[in-house]
């Protein structure tokens, strides 16, 4: 299946298939591609992803849905985001996490959330894409987080939101492909770009103690 076939579809109305207690959004049940599953108590919401592996998220919630709505509003009290970032013409990828967001690029557990994205990679004079990710412990997340991946400048900006402030931390890319574990203090500080952001990161990290 060609990457170019996929485009961002947040605000459009997508094709939806319902089989038993499974809701397929913008992907056919028989499509032979990797998928992201959100397993709610009453239904599974299933989205396409192009990371080459399936993602399973389990939530102890009952959700309501309306198949007549546009894509982002299908699930009541949730915002649906389907990111196929390699289709964007610019060089910046935006990813979001909060308890109210269902996305195809987020993996969640009781202990951490993982945000996945793809970046270009040149191997043997051929251009391809590879999956990268950022793992963030839940103790660092008060309300929501944003991740801005700037491919041109090879930086990642993480924004942590609580009720009164936004904490912004900027990191440089490790070698591609990479997985940054934000809970690993000694590894993460290698990539933080300035002392002010280092102090903000250490304050977040101390919340685990």
Image (tube, helix red, strand yellow):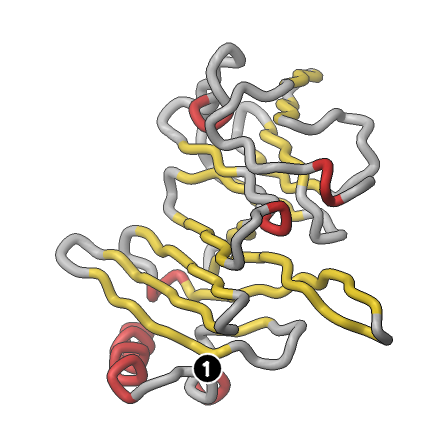
Q: Is residue 110 above or below residue 132?
A: above
Q: Residue furthest top?
A: 68
- x, y (%) of residue 35? 69, 41
Residue plotted at (70% across, 47% down): 50
Q: Give the position of the N terminus as an image quadrant.
A: top right
Q: Is residue 136 above or below residue 10?
A: below
Left/right placement of residue 179 relative to residue 148 reads: right
Q: Is residue 199 above or below residue 181?
A: below
Left/right placement of residue 99 relative to residue 43 reads: left
Left/right placement of residue 7 relative to residue 28 reads: left
Residue plotted at (32% across, 52% down): 144
- x, y (%) of residue 114? 53, 59
Res. 17 image quadrant: top right
Q: Is residue 54 above or below residue 68?
A: below
Which residue is label 1 attached to?
188
SS type, badge 1: helix
Q: Residue furthest right?
A: 124
- x, y (%) of residue 38? 57, 37
Task: State the residue in front, 119 or 114.
Answer: 119
Q: Residues within 10 Å of mark 1 (few under 14, many from 20)?
A: some
Q: Give the position of the C terminus as an image quadrant.
A: bottom left
Task: State the residue in front, 115 or 88.
Answer: 88
Residue plotted at (30% across, 61% down): 160
- x, y (%) of residue 191? 46, 83
Report how many numbered discs are placed on residues in the image. Answer: 1
Task: State the residue in front, 4 or 111.
Answer: 4
Residue plotted at (47% across, 55% down): 110
């Amino acid at each position: 299946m060609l990457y170019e076939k996929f485009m961002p579809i947040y605000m459009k109305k997508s094709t939806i298939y319902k089989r038993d207690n499974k809701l397929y959004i913008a992907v056919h049940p028989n499509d032979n591609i990797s998928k992201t599953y959100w397993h709610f108590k009453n239904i599974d919401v299933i989205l396409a992803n192009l990371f080459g592996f399936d993602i399973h998220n389990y939530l102890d919630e009952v959700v309501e849905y309306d198949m007549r709505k546009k894509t982002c509003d299908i699930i009541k009290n949730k915002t649906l985001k389907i990111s196929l970032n390699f289709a964007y013409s610019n060089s910046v990828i935006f990813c979001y996490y909060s308890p109210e967001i269902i996305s195809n690029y987020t993996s969640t557990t009781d202990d951490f959330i993982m945000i996945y994205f793809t970046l270009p990679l040149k191997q043997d004079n051929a251009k391809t894409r590879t999956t990268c990710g950022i793992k963030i412990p839940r103790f660092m997340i008060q309300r929501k987080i944003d991740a801005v991946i700037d491919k041109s400048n090879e930086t990642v900006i993480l924004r942590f939101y609580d009720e009164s402030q936004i904490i912004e931390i900027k990191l440089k890319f490790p070698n591609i492909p990479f997985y940054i574990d934000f809970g690993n203090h000694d590894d993460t500080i290698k990539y933080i770009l300035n002392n002010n952001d280092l102090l903000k990161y250490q304050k977040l990290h101390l919340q685990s103690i």
